[in-house]
Amino acid sequence: MTETPGTPAYMPPEVMVANPHYNTSVDVFSFGIMMIHTFTAEWPLPSIGPTRIDPANPNGLIPVTEAKRREEFLRKISPDHPLMDLIMHCLSNNPQQRVEMLQRVSALLTEKRELEEEVVRKDSAIQEKAGEIEALAEEKRRQEEESENTVERMQLVRSVETDQYKLENEDLKGQLEAKETIVNTKDEFIISRNSRIVKLETRCKQLTEEVEQQIANVNYTQNELVSKATKIAQLETDVTNLTAQVEQELADKNSIITHKDSMLASKDTYLQKNKTTIQSLNNQLTKTRDYLTSKPQSLGLE
């Protein structure tokens, strides 16, 4: 009789032969069996053999898929379970399909990094917009300081436009304070999000180490395996919950960024309107100064 290392119930068909070749796909298959055991609290031993009679040739045999051999246990797991597709890939009779499962996990991690980079790019755009607003506000303050040095302008503008400009400046100040609040909220969100990502990565690393340890130590007693399986189930639940929270927070963040872009566009329009108004007032004051210079006696300035 040929002997191979490992527990037969956890081994894929390609290693149930003489001189088998062990690789990553064998570990992935064993991980799939562990997930079935975790979700059903039962040992998913095959209920039928690895082959069956070929209906087209009564004298021939055809292979039975590993999922079909454990169909009674798979039925106890909801078809809508988020990890059902992962379990089916792990139990595939084709070792290449099991390796493709690992590639899919790698692709998900790459997508997460791309989302983080997109958030960084949007934050940079917000900072650029904030710099432009501050530059425009500084230009407005400089123009107001220049206008205060002209006595004629003070006499005309203070009598007509003082109250209006006070209201406009208060509104602008309120908008700038709102912008600062949004930026602070954004920073707090990023810190919280980064903390959650670190926790998620730590938990994923712990889960991987636990699974690798269980695969390496296949001679655990039944009580030890049940304890480890319960711990893995809890970790998987935490990973699923944290992943959903991160995705929801990223969606909320994108909504906040879209809203801030709209506010910044409105502020740009408002500041452009103020700039046009100031230019018009400058033109009026120039004309008034020329008029006062040409007719000083009529105004009683001499």
Image (cartoon, rainbow, N blue to C red):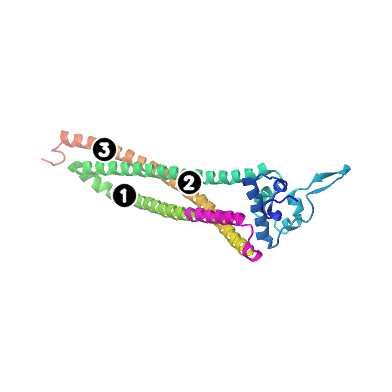
SS assignment at label 2: helix
Question: Is residue 200 in the magenta section?
Answer: yes
In the picture of the structure, the residue carrying the numbered disc 2 is 116
Q: Nearer the viewer, mark 1 or mark 2?
A: 2
**Residue 193 in the figure: left or right of residue 77:** left
Q: What residue sits 56% from the left and 53% below the top?
A: 208
Q: Residue 175's x, y, as percent?
A: 37, 50
Examine the structure image and report whether residue 240 is included in the region drawn in magenta.
no
Secondary structure of the residue carrying numbered label 3: helix
How far across and how far down the image is residue 67, in percent?
73, 51
Distance in Å between CA atoms under marks 3 and 1 = 18 Å
The image quarter in which residue 140 lies: top left
Residue 111 rendering spot, x and y as whole percentages: 54, 44
C-beta proximity under 8 Å, tags 3 and 1: no
Q: In the image, what residue occupies the spot 64% across and 59% down?
A: 219
Q: Position of residue 182 (x, y in %)?
A: 41, 52
Q: Nearer the viewer, residue 186 or 233?
A: 233
